[in-house]
Image (tube, helix red, strand yellow):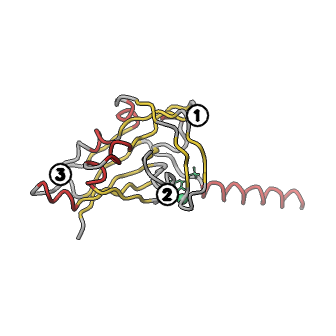
Amino acid sequence: MKKHILILLLLVNIFAWAQTKITPTEQFIITGKIKTELKFTLADINSYPVVPIKNVILTNHLGEVKGNIQNIKGIALKPLLEKIEFLAEKPKELSEFYLTFVASDGYKVVYSWNEIFNSETGNNLFIITEKDGKKLTDLDDRILTITTTDFKTGRRYVKALDKIIVGRVE
Ligand SMILES: Nc1nc2c(c(=O)[nH]1)N[C@H]1C(S)=C(S)[C@@H](COP(=O)(O)O)O[C@H]1N2
Ligand SMILES: [Mo]
């Protein structure tokens, strides 16, 4: 009987763990208010030039330190986002557009067009391709993005990026 209870407890634990684990992604698509949908696989991502990324202290919304992200490498996300053809008639309309990063667990993070293409933030937005000696294909958090200049870096540390949805304000 005791044995059965132990096995049951073990199963309950495994189930709870499986539920909290975020499923890594193998590709992400860019969709929404754009001319043609785009898709980037791990191989596509790996074809971009790798740059070293400065050490980042990961802080949550309270400013509490959640970790120190050291010795990471990545690729700049902007060249990928520059392939987007926004459904805008005039250039000034681009200021109405925003990009929602959606993770496999439903976590969502918003960037405005201006933040990415008209501010320093866009130059500090990366896909992490190497962390703790692990390459992109072995990273548990893949596809992982970070904005190194954010004040609270945890919020836009998007694990398991699944898609980017381009929207336009109503
Ligand atoms: N996919 C996904 N990414 C996420 C989150 C999430 O819930 N889902 N939470 C974010 C928040 S609010 C924080 S503070 C950090 C926490 O990172 P850690 O779990 O590695 O400490 O992850 C960020 N990335
Ligand atoms: Mo957070």
Q: CA distance from mark 3 to mark 1?
A: 38 Å
Q: Quadrant of ligand 2?
A: bottom right
Which residue lies at the image location 34% right of the left edge and 53% below the top edge?
164
The kind of secondary structure element at disc 3 is: loop
The quadrant in which the C terminus is found is bottom left
Image side of residue 87 versus residue 73, left or right: left
Under mark 2, the amino acid is Asp
The kind of secondary structure element at disc 2 is: loop
Q: Are marks 3 and 1 in contact (CB under 8 Å)?
A: no
Q: Nearer the viewer, mark 3 or mark 1?
A: 1
Q: Which residue is mark 2?
A: 105
**Residue 160 image offset from top left, x and y in percent:** 47, 48
Q: CA distance from mark 3 to mark 2?
A: 27 Å
Query: Is label 2's Cβ within 8 Å of ligand 1?
Result: yes
* Badge 3 density bin: few <14, some 14–19, many ≥20, Cα 10 Å: few
Which residue lies at the image location 24% right of the left edge and 43% below the top edge?
82
Under mark 3, the amino acid is Lys
**Residue 138 image offset from top left, x and y in percent:** 53, 35
Query: Is label 1's Cβ within 8 Å of ligand 1?
Result: no
The kind of secondary structure element at disc 1 is: loop
Which residue lies at the image location 62% right of the left edge and 54% below the top edge?
18
Q: Which residue is mark 1?
A: 132
* Badge 2 density bin: few <14, some 14–19, many ≥20, Cα 10 Å: some
Using the image, tell me which numbered label, if any, was put on residue 169. none
Q: Nearer the viewer, mark 1 or mark 2?
A: 1
**Residue 30 image offset from top left, x and y in percent:** 30, 50
Q: Which residue is mark 3?
A: 35
The quadrant in which the N terminus is found is bottom right
Q: Are marks 3 and 2 in contact (CB under 8 Å)?
A: no
Q: Is residue 41 above or below residue 22?
A: above
Question: In this view of the protein, which residue sits in the foreground, 87 or 152?
Answer: 152
Image side of residue 69 versus residue 16, left or right: left
